[in-house]
Amino acid sequence: MFLPQNAPTPSDRLHATHPREREQQANYRVYSFGQFRLFSNEKAIKEPMWRRSKAKTLLKWFVLNPGKLCSADQFIDLFWPELPLDAAMGNLHVTIHFLRHLLEPSLCSRQESKFVRRQANNFYWFDMDKEWWTDTSNVEQFFENAKMYDRREDYNKALYYYRKIVSYCSLGFIPEDEAEPWLQPYRQHYSYMYSQVLVRLIQIYQLRNETEEVLEHAYLALATNPYCEPAVRAIIDTHLKEGNTSIAMYKFEHFHGSLRRDLGMEPSKEMHALRQKIVLASK
């Protein structure tokens, strides 16, 4: 599973350049949340400039795996499994050549690329230096920062970083490649992170009695996972505190029915205890 390599420590990040400044200073910017986009020196690399679709796919793999060695055979198995070996190897070499010159147009013949590197034994890796910025690395750093401030009970700063993660993850991770099997581990990673963050936002806003924010993030969580019990509990609890016992009971019964019908499961003890609170409040 990809995690950014050589990521700064939490203490480093406290005194680091502001994330927006790092993004704007980078010569190469890659966005994987929402449609995949690459900017080179402020210029967007648009579809006609790619020409070879596999070049874009290969770049996606590289930026998600900076510094990781991958053999030519592994790339062929990933991206050209249906072709004879000689044809697939030729496609790989042409695609890498195209990608190198797309990223570095001034590259001379036989000059080594700064980024797409190759070992003598036909292993490749991507050298992502400080010229590069990616939103995936940003999100990972936001997550570490948020957890650090959360542990310190500095909720204002924790909320800032958690909400930044929501703003990215709500766009979807490379949605145009939803069916690509090799992207599933990354997609699952960010989906799980998104769910964790939404639940934690719900909990913090409950502590702060910020009802509108509780409901906003609870419904976001349910849009991702309709069986997210912490989100349903938060919605029911909010209506109960506001005296809307009939709505609270409706929400419980609806969730109970869906859980039993769709998953063959029963709500937790906490949910049943909440139902008892609704019953008592209704009397």
Image (cartoon, rainbow, N blue to C red):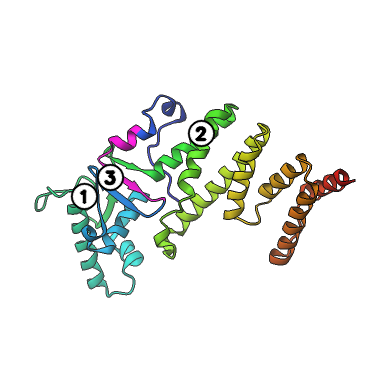
Q: Is residue 86 left or right of residue 262?
A: left
Dot 2 or dot 1: first in sequence order is 1
The magenta stretch spans residue 27: yes
Above-or-below relation of 144 to 249: above
Whether 262 is among the magenta residues is no
- The reply to whether dot 2 and dot 3 touch (C-beta < 8 Å) is no
Residues at marks 2 and 1, CA–CA distance in whole angstroms: 34 Å
Q: Position of residue 97 (x, y in %)?
A: 18, 58
Total marks placed? 3
Q: In this view of the protein, which residue sits in the foreground, 248 or 178?
A: 248
Residue 134 at what x, y percent from top left? 35, 44
Q: Of circles 1 and 3, which is in front? A: 1
Point 52% across, 38% down: residue: 162
Give me the residue at 21% from left, 50% from top: 103
In the picture of the structure, the residue carrying the numbered disc 3 is: 127
Look at 54% across and 32% down and name the residue there: 158
Q: Are marks 2 and 1 in contact (CB under 8 Å)?
A: no
Q: Is residue 185 left or right of residue 70?
A: right
